[in-house]
Image: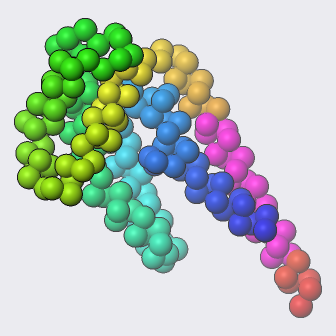
Amino acid sequence: YAVSCAIINSFNLLPVYPLDGGQYFQAVLFNRHYLIEFFFQLTTLLLLIAIAFTIQDVLIGLFAFFLLFGLPRLLRDGKIAHELPSQSNWTSRDLSADQLRMIKKKLFDLDLKFYKNRDARKHLHERIEGIWIRIINRKMSAGLSVVFIAVYLLVLVLSFIILSATFQFEQGIVSTGS
């Protein structure tokens, strides 16, 4: 049971959205610039592929494969959220009709294929909401971002240390018990 919990916790802390680690990085670091998020996600994806090949794990490979499909949308939505605030007053927490039209127009200009796909149009509200959240989230100072990343890395390292110790403990029980 303890090993399962440690594995789930360690996996959940990976800095990949929508996992908890990804949401943490989104709030702390990625709202500073969309290209930071894109290259971080790309690096994470490549690391997951390398891990999948190294330990020959199909599930991690499939997870990485599905993340690959989200990268273009991540880049487009980040670009929209980065460009729009310079065109209008985006300080209010409420989305005005004009701002909604601007987001829709940008989505249409950058992602025409999205509007041609009827199934994708069903998720338009979710996509607009995600872009809006990116716009209104306040950017954290660089110093505070560094502190939060250091805390995250400490928790992540401790999680992997506990996971490793748990595996070693169980290996000791198995080898002495047989």
The residue lying at 41 percent from left, 69 percent from top is: 61
Observer-nearest of 123 and 177: 123
Q: Residue furthest right?
A: 177
Above or below, comparing residue 148 to residue 41 in the picture: above
Figure coloring: rainbow
Quarter-wise, where is residue 104 in the image? top left
Above or below, comparing residue 173 to residue 88 in the picture: below
Q: Position of residue 2 (x, y in %)?
A: 79, 64
Q: Residue furthest bottom?
A: 178
Q: Position of residue 114 (x, y in %)?
A: 15, 49
Quarter-wise, where is residue 29 in the image? top left
Q: Position of residue 118 (x, y in %)?
A: 15, 56
The residue lying at 38 percent from left, 28 percent from top is: 133
* Magenta-span inclusion, residue 39: no
Main SS category, magenta section: helix
Residue 104 as seen in the image, left or right of residue 5: left
The residue lying at 45 percent from left, 76 percent from top is: 58
Is residue 38 visible in the rendered structure shown here? no
Q: Specify the segment rendered in magenta.
A: 152-172
The residue lying at 85 percent from left, 82 percent from top is: 174
Observer-nearest of 5 and 61: 5
Above or below, comparing residue 169 to residue 161 in the picture: below
Is residue 91 visible in the rendered structure shown here? yes
Q: Position of residue 95 (x, y in %)?
A: 30, 20
* Magenta-span inclusion, residue 159: yes
**From the image, which quarter does the C terminus lie in?**
bottom right
Q: How many marks?
A: 0
**From the image, which quarter does the N terminus lie in?**
bottom right
Observer-nearest of 138 and 10: 138
